[in-house]
Image (cartoon, helix red, strand yellow):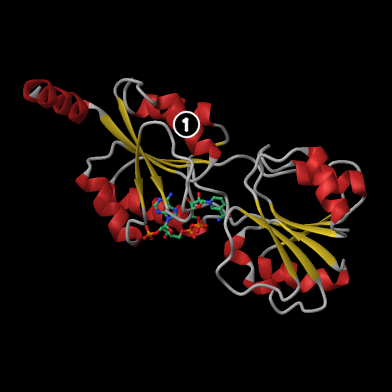
């Protein structure tokens, strides 16, 4: 048993460690694609925000690294061969840390980021640059707001006492929230019929969303179009990574190339 364990450890150390910064379905898809792919050893990293995260295939670690310095040290200590930043398009701090940390540790970095959404015929989208701008715009657009931007960013809306909010998030918010608020705890994917029914039931007249992209949560946009509702669309922060791909399969190809598979 001991000999077998030593050999396993030796094999593991010959593998090329790839850190996948995750917390997204794209990251889970990438981990699944690379799970068991020789000579790669994938370690997925989660921030630890949600109490019951959906864990990716293979190894994972949970919790912050301790800024750029901590991430750089982690990459060095674990002799990482590559990093894929597959975090959410709005997770700007960890993405910036990934650029700086990978550079400091001399490790190649790839950004995996799904494309943003594009408006179609019949859409009435108002683009804004931040949650603060969304909150400023809302009183001129509607009274009954479907807020789908997550539990972490409710504070900018907390001062809007004349509006009513339906907030949907995976877990309950712990920061400031609007006074007139109903909370619905739910995790995507969401279906069009359910989104239409939810918006009708609550007499929603405006939807607020981040431009997250992807299919998991896009049904609210179809529902808003069907119901003729305006959407306040918060644009993404810019990415500083030099190499970017849009799909998990492209990221897997990059990893295998970098790891000499
Ligand atoms: P953030 O503001 O960019 O990051 C804040 C700090 O959280 C980072 O400095 C880092 O701490 C830690 N962190 C973030 N992602 C991490 C990861 N994958 N592994 C280890 N540490 C991580 O991030 P956020 O917007 O709060 O998002 C947190 C997580 O939720 C991310 O994994 C993201 O993919 C996921 N997520 C975010 C959103 C969103 O809208 N922002 C939506 C869905 C999922 P240290 O500096 O200590 O390393």
Q: Decide if residue 96 is on the left or right side of residue 117.
A: left
Residue 124 visible in this rendered orientation of the protein: no
Frontmost residue, 24 versus 251: 24
User: What residue sits 24% from the left and 53% below the top?
Assistant: 73
Frontmost residue, 71 versus 161: 161
User: What residue sits 68% from the left and 76% below the top?
Assistant: 158
Mark 1 CB within 8 Å of ligand 1? no
Residue on which the image places disc 1: 30
Label tally: 1
User: What residue sits 22% from the left and 40% below the top?
Assistant: 79
Q: Please provide percent x and percent y for residue 71.
A: 31, 53
Q: Decide if residue 255 is on the left or right side of residue 147.
A: left
Q: Decide if residue 105 is on the left or right side of residue 189.
A: left
- Image quadrant where one finds the C terminus: top left
Secondary structure at badge 1 equals: helix
- Image quadrant where one finds the N terminus: top left
Q: Please provide percent x and percent y for residue 4.
A: 12, 20
User: What residue sits 84% from the left and 73% below the top?
Assistant: 139
Q: Residues within 10 Å of mark 1 (few under 14, many from 20)?
A: many
Decide: is 51 above or below 35: below
Q: Please provide percent x and percent y for residue 230.
A: 86, 56
Q: Please provide percent x and percent y for residue 72.
A: 28, 53
Residue that extends furthest to the left in the rendered view of this protein = 3
Decide: is 13 above or below 162: above
Residue 157 visible in this rendered orientation of the protein: yes
């Amino acid at each position: 048993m001991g000999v077998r364990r030593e050999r396993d450890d030796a094999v593991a150390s010959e593998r090329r460690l790839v850190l996948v910064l995750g917390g997204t379905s794209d990251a889970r898809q990438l981990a699944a694609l690379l799970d068991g792919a020789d000579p790669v050893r994938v370690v997925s990293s989660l921030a630890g925000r949600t109490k019951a995260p959906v864990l990716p295939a293979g190894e994972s670690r949970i919790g912050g690294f301790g800024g750029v310095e901590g991430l750089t040290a982690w990459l060095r200590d674990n002799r990482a061969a590559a990093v894929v930043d597959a975090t959410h398009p709005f997770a700007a701090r960890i993405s910036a840390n990934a650029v700086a940390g990978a550079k400091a540790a001399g490790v190649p970095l790839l950004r995996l980021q799904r494309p943003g959404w594009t408006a179609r015929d019949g859409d009435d989208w108002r683009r804004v640059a931040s949650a603060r701008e969304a909150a400023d715009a809302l009183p001129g657009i509607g009274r009954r707001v479907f807020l789908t931007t997550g539990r972490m960013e409710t504070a900018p809306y907390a001062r809007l006492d004349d509006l009513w909010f339906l907030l949907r998030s995976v877990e309950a918010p712990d920061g400031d929230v609007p006074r007139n608020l109903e909370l619905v705890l739910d995790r995507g994917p969401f279906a069009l019929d359910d989104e239409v029914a939810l918006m009708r039931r609550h007499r929603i007249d405006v939807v607020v969303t981040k431009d997250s992209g992807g299919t998991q949560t896009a049904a609210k946009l179809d529902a808003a179009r069907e119901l003729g509702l305006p959407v306040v669309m918060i644009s993404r922060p810019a990415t500083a990574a030099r190499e970017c791909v849009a799909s998990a399969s492209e990221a897997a190809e990059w990893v295998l190339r970098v790891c000499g598979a």
